[in-house]
Image (tube, coloured by chain):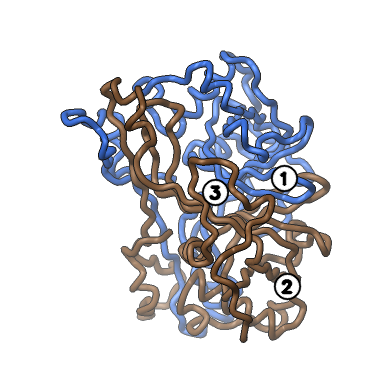
Chain colours: A brown, B blue
Amino acid sequence: MTHTEPPHTLTPTDRTRPRRMKEQASFERSDLESVLDAGFVCHLGVIVDGAPRVLPTVYGRDGGRLYVHGSVASRSLAADPDTEICVTVTHVDGLVLARSVFEHGVNYRSAMVYGVPRVLADDAEKTEALRVLTHHAAPGQWEYARRPDRKELAATTVLELSLEEASVKISAGPPDDGRSPDAQLGRWAGTLPLTSRWGAPTADPLLAPGITAPAHVVARAGTRQG
Amino acid sequence: MTHTEPPHTLTPTDRTRPRRMKEQASFERSDLESVLDAGFVCHLGVIVDGAPRVLPTVYGRDGGRLYVHGSVASRSLAADPDTEICVTVTHVDGLVLARSVFEHGVNYRSAMVYGVPRVLADDAEKTEALRVLTHHAAPGQWEYARRPDRKELAATTVLELSLEEASVKISAGPPDDGRSPDAQLGRWAGTLPLTSRWGAPTADPLLAPGITAPAHVVARAGTRQG
């Protein structure tokens, strides 16, 4: 697929413009892409019967577009046309332990994308979006596993969301109260980092003997995620 | 605080009753509590100007109540009274790599809580909720760090949400297609586990020499989170 090259800087809107000082907001497209590319599970916000609903789901990114998918039986993905959704991706990098409880916090990287999604209808478009999504979450598996057939495509809803309206917030580094009067309390302050790593692949107990995990799966073991 | 003992089983409502087969839904209160207690960052869903917004934020649980907090300057926490919110907590345990792309998925534990929150107004109530929240995310720090003063309490919005309407979904174990015709493809299938661990505490560069990290912080290093 060919896409129009998106601008390098995101245009702030009323809801993506930062209001608070502690978190660092970024409007660099490269920061948005790096937060999105580091993860594979997002939290999808929809409105169902007038109330917000937040669902964890897998996503993928291709250029300036984000894809989420689900069962056609899911009420949450069957939102009304022209209804906005919000997709949030968050990586928690650690706890910020300050001298005061008030300055405690979390180091994190988070992206929020807003927009009205497009429901993909065409089989070729859906297949391409599922390739993007599979490659994003489980690189190598689109080439290795059996691809979706027409019946499976029909059972899958795929939403496409533009990255046009998005915000990125990054909070990193030590606590903010190192030069405040609280520094005189003599209390320890710093961060407690949190890291996610892939473990060794575990074979399905039903797997026939002699089938070994492919190199693209084995290679992820021990690597960092997020 | 004394709370009425909640029932051991959650009562399904139209939106918490499971619709799909692949995920295992649980209505055991102990499962809900264990998913909530394993994390400290939730995704809070609110409606702002008619559109859904999903924000990562810290939470804490005390009995049958959940607390989230934020700056009073935050528009997202200043939702209208009597407006529902949704709080979702997700732990990603790994990727499910099946014989077919269609059966690929994520092993996870997720809790969703729905309700109209109560905005805490009283300083004593707010202080107690912040104690719960701090103890939940950073055990030991409420006792160790300087506690919030009146000005800091005034700058903090705390929402209380009952756990009465909630759902828990748990997906675990190998892929589902071990006995399907796809098993004849001779492809490897299994899971790729994902684990989060706390690292060693990193001191604030502004910390005066000779102040060492307290035992309750050092003890978390190397332990699992989630």
To the question of a shared chain for discs 1 and 3, the answer is: yes
Residue B36 in view in this figure: yes
Instruction: Find residue B68 and report its horizontal and vertical position in percent.
Output: 58, 33
Residue at 52%, 51% (x, y): give it. Answer: A25
Task: Bin the neighbour count of mark 2 within 10 Å (Cα to Cα): few under 14, some 14-19, many 20 and up.
Answer: few
Task: Bin the neighbour count of mark 3 within 10 Å (Cα to Cα): few under 14, some 14-19, many 20 and up.
Answer: many
| Side of B102 where B188 appears, left or right | left
Q: What's the distance in space between the residues labelled 1 and 3, CA to CA? A: 16 Å
Task: Bin the neighbour count of mark 1 within 10 Å (Cα to Cα): few under 14, some 14-19, many 20 and up.
Answer: many
Helix, strand or loop status at disc 1: loop
Instruction: Find residue A93 and report its horizontal and vertical position in percent.
Output: 40, 49
Q: Which residue is mark 1?
A: B16
Q: Nearer the viewer, mark 1 or mark 3?
A: 3
- For badge 1, the amino acid type reads Thr
Instruction: Find residue A185 and report its horizontal and vertical position in percent.
Output: 30, 20
Look at the picture and state if B209 lies above or below A162: above
Of residues A157 and B98, the one drawn nearer to the viewer in this rendering = A157
Residue at 73%, 53% (x, y): give it. Answer: A46
Q: Which residue is mark 2?
A: A155
Q: Chain of mark 2?
A: A
Label disc, if present, on residue A33 of the rendered structure:
none
- For badge 2, the amino acid type reads Ala
Residue A90 in view in this figure: no
- For badge 3, the amino acid type reads Thr
Q: Chain of mark 3?
A: B
Which of the 4 image quarters holds residue B164?
top right
